[in-house]
Amino acid sequence: MDTFSIARQPIVDADRSVVAYELFNRSRSATEHSSASDLSVALNAVAQSGAPLWASHHDLFLNTVPQGLVGDHWEFLPTKNIVVKVRHLPGHDPQAIAETALALADLKRRGFRLCFHHTVVAPAYKAWQPLASFVSIETPTVKPEQLGQLVAAITSRTSAKPIAQKVEHGAQFEALLTLGVEMFQGYWFSKPEVLHPTVLSPGQISAMGLFNLLRAEAPIEEVEQALKKDAALGVNLLRIINSAGVGLNRRVTSLRQAVMLMGYKRLARWSAMLLTTSAEGGISLVSSAAVVRARMMEMLALQDLSTEESESAFLVGLLSLLDRMLGTDLQQALGQLSLDDAVVQSLVSPSGKYSELLALASACESDDEAAFSTAFSRLGYSLRQINMAHMEALAWSDALE
C-alpha cells in the first residue's frame, strides 16, 4: 500500500449537499499506474483502512478499467452503496464493447450500480446503455451549445442520472440545472466564488460562548447555565455526546453529567464542532470538509504527538474553513474565540506548528498531485497511514450527520 495513495472528491446534489464520494488513485508517479490500479488501490484502501465506509450514508464511486471488471475481489465488497465507474474503451472496438458488456451485466446482476462516461450514448455502446445507473458528463469536453442535446440523449437512451463533472463556476452550474442535471462534481462546489459576510445564528453565538467558557476553565455552574440558556445547544450537545463516535461507556442523561463525564477539553472540542452547523442545523459541504480535516489531522498527530497536541491539531482542521462557514475574514473569526497561540499561528501562517498537517489534509480533498506530493514529502507518515486516517475521517464525519 505504501506505493499508492487514494483521494476522494465529493459529488453533490442541486442543493450542494454531499450525496457521494468518488475514490480514485493518486500514485506518486503517473507512470506507476497498472491496467487495474485504480480499482485495486481503492479496494485495498477501503479494506485496510478499518473504516466502515460501506455503512456510509453516501454512495462510493470506484474507478476501474475493463481488466478489473472480473475477479474475486468483487466478492468482498457489499453492493449497497458501491457504484462501479467504467471508462469508455480505446478505439470504441465493437468486439471489446460486446465482451465488456457481459462483465458489466454480471456486476449489475450482483447488485452493483454502474456509471459510464457520456460517450455511452453513442450507438456503438448500445449494449451498455440499459446497464447505466449514472452517466458522467465531462463538461469541459462538451461545447456549451451541445450540452442540451447530450443530456437529452442520456435521458432518452438510458435510465441513468447524469453527473456533471469539472463544474468550475456558477454560470455552468445554473445552466446545467436548467437542463435537468441534478448531480455535480467540481472545484466550484468546494470553494465559493464570492465571500459574503453573514450574521452569526443564535446557535453559533451560543456555541462560541460555550467554547470560550470552557477554554477559560470557568466554574461548572457557569458552563451548565450556558447550556440551559440555549435549549437547542444543550440538545445538540447531548445528541453528539450520546453518539457512538464519542466512545463513552454510558449514556449521558443530564447537562451537568455531560460536563462532568466529558471534561472541559472534550466539551470545548464538541462546542467548536457545533460552530460548523448552519442556522438550520444541517451540515454543509464546507462544514463536512472541515470535520474530515479535523479528524484526519487528529489521527495522524496521534502517531507521534501527545494527546493534548492531537486535540489542538483537531481544532486547527475544524477551524481552517471558519471564514467560509461564517462568511467573514478568518482572523476576524478567530478573534472571537479563545485559542492557543499555536492553533492560531497554524491557521494563519505556513510556519505554524500544525500547518504542514493542515496542508496534507487539504491536499487530500482534491486530485492536485503536486500539492499532495509537497505535503507528503515534508511529513514522516507513510501513504498507508495517510490512507487509513483519511478513510476513517470520512466514515467518522459521515456518522455525525
Image (cartoon, rainbow, N blue to C red):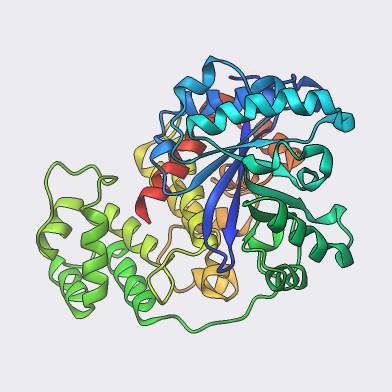
Q: Residue at x 86, y 27 (%)?
A: 93
**Residue 100 lies in what quarter of the image?**
top right
Q: Residue at x 44, y 63 (%)?
A: 283
Give coordinates of residue 54: x percent, y percent. Answer: 42, 37
**Residue 99 lies in what quarter of the image?**
top right
Above or below residue 131? Residue 19 is: below
Q: Residue at x 44, y 45 (%)?
A: 295
Q: Residue at x 80, y 56 (%)?
A: 139
Give coordinates of residue 174: x percent, y percent. Answer: 71, 73
Give coordinates of residue 166: x percent, y percent. Answer: 75, 54
Give coordinates of residue 56: x percent, y percent. Answer: 41, 44
Front residue of 392/205: it is: 392
Above or below residue 195? Residue 242 is: above
Front residue of 340/25: it is: 25
- The reply to whether residue 66 is visible in this rendering is yes
Front residue of 102/39: it is: 102
391 sits left or right of 269 in the view: right
Q: Quadrant of the N terminus?
A: top right
Outermost residue to the top: 72
Q: Quadrant of the C terminus?
A: bottom left
